[in-house]
Image (spheres, rainbow, N blue to C red):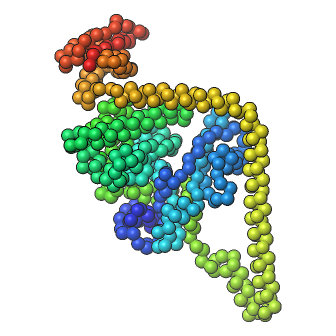
Amino acid sequence: MKVIYLSKDSIYINENDRVVKKELGYEKGIITSSLGYNHILNITFKLSKDIDKEMLEVEAEKYVFTEGSLDYSKEYKINYIFKEYDDHYNVEAFIVETDVLKKQFEKYLKIYKYIDFISAKPFVFKSYYDISNIKPQNDAFIYLDENEAFLSCFENGEFVFVKSISKLSSLAKQLDVSVDEVKNILMTKGLNQDNYDDIETFNVIDSFFTQFFMKVSNLINYSVSYYGLTKVDRIFFYSPFEIENLFESYNSFWDLSGIAFKKYEIPTDYDAFDYTATIYNTKHYQNENENFSIFPKPIPFYKTKSGILVLLIILSVLFIGVDAFVKNQTIKKKESEILLLKKKINRNMREEKLLKSAVIKYHKVIAKIKADNLAIQKQITDISEKVMFLENIQRKKLTANELADLVNELKKYNLKLLSFEKNGDNISLLIVSEFGNSSDIADFMKDMYKLGYKNVESTEIKNKDGIYISKVSYDE
């Protein structure tokens, strides 16, 4: 069976594990595609462990309609991921309006009339390990194209979470140019300052990516506490276009965090993400829990209940007569009326449950006001701290060469950087000798003098349980 993946302006056909790319056009097979994260509302919440597993989806739906402020007059396609912990269930809800799905896949439906399977782009990276034959670790994947950007994290090959990050449209707004112009600048000039006559444009782009990767770092740190990840080992960066000098500019940044920063690459001449999505959809198209399609393949009329009924009616006409035909038509009409009434009853029952949940919620509003105020104050404090941190980052005057020198010297003497502080023109490094050798720290300071660092000083080298720790400082 052929599995067909619908990309932007082309199709990928996977037949017998051989993928071929063609222009967009009709082909027979399993029809699949993928949906951008920018069209998905992602709500993360917890449910009590006391809830029966059979009722989890019902309780989750109550939550997303009441707390997620969904419009009762609209239709949605909702998929859930439930992760069980000792005292609760963690729930990831992925919600898409059916009108959005119809608009996004309108041009494909004109050709195919149906789509069997639609995956969410953040899940697609799971197939990276199958394609590259690389052992899964705790990995983060960054997706950045002209329309969206997100961070998708996996723990040993299993999806953990996804979060949105800064899009190129915000950079285009800062530069007062179109997204296509931003794309062209990044491809031709990128993050290489020597390529710019207008240094202000470079500074805006450099600041955008500094904040871009700082947000990625903050999201990773958040995931460690909220989702229980021990760490992130690797970050893979995907974009359908090359960004000049990106990896050279930020390898040192991620080196200091102990995270490998790599380009997302697989063995193919096609677009790496489209190829990965083709493989992913081939493997998962039968999993309805991941399917966002609302466009099923039409059932041949003769296989439908109506079709079978028509055949019976024809036989009745031939062997029984017109009277039997009329009676069968009446039965069919009554069955339709009954089905319609059942649908209305089910909808009313669902709305009644949701309204009851809303009543319970608003009984608790007064009690929650004080707690909400405390939470808001905590958020304000947290945001203030992050703003101060970002301002400190922007005030740093270390050049790429200085960072590289520090990284190389630390690696040379097997030293580990515990913290980095800047106070005015004075910079302090808290370092530790990984092999318990105090002379390594002294030799590190000698090399700093040789490299031209001014006023290099250190606190007393302290031995704690065989580990030598010292605070080394110097002036810019």
- Report the residue at 40% width, 49% height from top: 169
Q: Is residue 74 visible?
A: yes
- Report the residue at 57% width, 62% height from top: 99
Q: Is residue 283 visible?
A: no
Q: In the visual, does 334 lie left or right of 205? A: right
Q: Nearer the viewer, residue 458 or 185?
A: 185
Count of numbered badges drawn on the protein: 0
Q: In the rendered image of this protein, does residue 18 appear above or below residue 188?
A: below
The residue positioned farthest toward the top in the image shown: 460
Whole-percent x, y for residue 49 in the image: 69, 37
- Report the residue at 31% width, 13% height from top: 472
Quadrant position of residue 174: top left
Whole-percent x, y for residue 193 in the image: 23, 39
Q: Nearer the viewer, residue 193 or 260?
A: 193
Q: In the visual, does 255 lie left or right of 401? A: right
- Report the residue at 78% width, 73% height from top: 337
Q: In the visual, does 451 lie left or right of 255? A: left
Which quadrant of the figure contains the C terminus?
Answer: top left
Whole-percent x, y for residue 232 in the image: 43, 34
